[in-house]
Image (cartoon, rainbow, N blue to C red):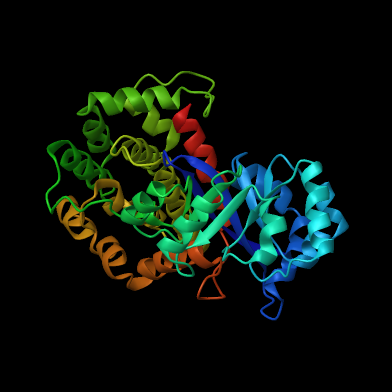
Amino acid sequence: MQPFAFARQPILDTSLQLYAFEFLYRPANDVTHNEHSITHEVLASSILDLGLNQASNNTLAFINMSYDDLMAAHVEALPSEKIILELLEDIQPDSALITRVSTLKKQGFKFALDDFVYSSDWDPLIELADIIKFDLTMTTLEENQALIKKLSNKNILFLAEKIETYDEYETYKGIGCTLFQGFFFSKPETIKGSSLNANTVVKTKLLSSIHQDDISFERLEEIIQEDPNLTFLLLKYLNSAHFSFSNPIHSIKQAIVILGVNDFKKWVTLLTLRNISSKPDELLRLALVRARQAELFAKGAYLTNSNSYFLSGVLSVFDAMLDTPLESIIKSMSLDPEISQALLTHEGEMGHALKEIIQYEATGEYCSESLPNNYPAACQWADQILASLKA
């Protein structure tokens, strides 16, 4: 079986909570492979364990299906309660396909129609569909609104895909869409200006202070103890089931000794991030995935500043977290110039890594073939951390 690479894109509901992930996948190191035939290999491989149980955190997973994929016998072996079979837009409906979809529906499978543009040829499949997806680059708002009205008596959910701004999200929610796919949540909702509120300034300065390379053990302890709420949250978290230390941790000094300085900084960063914004959890998950990937890149290259790489991944979503230009946030933090450059221009070794990470989110591919694929491991780690932070 060929190894594969995948990326996942979150699908959110009207409350901006996670509904499902769509998985984008391709066989690794095989540029000649037809992407629509990959499903045969993917569905028969370890993506069932990695993709559905770990990466999707036990939520639903959308999996693209070509005509041949859907007709294959192995589809019945899939967990119907975990996946939604997404019929690609270039499928030509025929009687055999309609019969196949009807049979699978009776077995509990759900179906989505991808990049839907109405044609009467699709009427039989509309009757069987659970979800219809609109690609905002392929159909107009008026066309989609008319179709939603036409099908209002059907038990169908409508999903707006390639939503890039909060305005588009609000518009499509207003016409009846209840599911949304795109990276709009990773961008500022409304730029509030160049100034941060006092509480946020304190937290961003705390982050920049603890990530100084030459910070002493004593100074690190002192900075955390100056924030009673953070101290309480940190000790509570370190004594949770996620860590299961043999003995309780009662002080910041004890925590630094047990975790080590770098890991201690990491957990302080995550808890600060969790409490700095009320944005959707998926934005925090995205920050965790980016941070972990960047950290693993640095460790894989035997760099000594993996902690700075981790921080660059976290800070890459701060403009969306705080609805403030990234330049203003960086100015308030007195960051290492290498981190600032990476965030603002994607230049330098760290900036290149961050650019590759963001590229992978959208396409499932790195620009450079020499980079190791740390994405699955980063997703698994991020899911575990987010679950523990919410516990």
Q: For this rendering, which residue is in front, 305 or 350?
A: 350
Residue 13 to residue 249: above or below: below
Q: Is residue 310 left or right of residue 228?
A: right
Image quarter for residue 370? bottom right
Q: Is residue 215 left or right of residue 267?
A: left
Q: For this rendering, which residue is in front, 97 or 391?
A: 97
Give percent across and percent down for residue 102. Answer: 79, 50
Give percent across and percent down for residue 273. Answer: 33, 40
* Residue that appears at 82% across and 55% down: 100
Residue 355 to residue 236: above or below: below
The residue sitting at the right extreme is 73
* Residue that appears at 59% across and 40% down: 57
Give percent across and percent down for residue 292. Answer: 47, 52
Q: Quadrant of the N terminus?
A: bottom right
**Any part of residue 301 in sight:** no
* Residue that appears at 59% across and 46% down: 156
Image quarter for residue 24? bottom right
Q: Is residue 137 left or right of residue 212?
A: right
**Any part of residue 173 in sight:** yes
Q: For this rendering, which residue is in front, 258 or 106?
A: 106
Give percent across and percent down for residue 204. Answer: 22, 44
Residue 258 to residue 149: above or below: above
The residue sitting at the bottom extreme is 32
Count numbered badges in the picture: 0
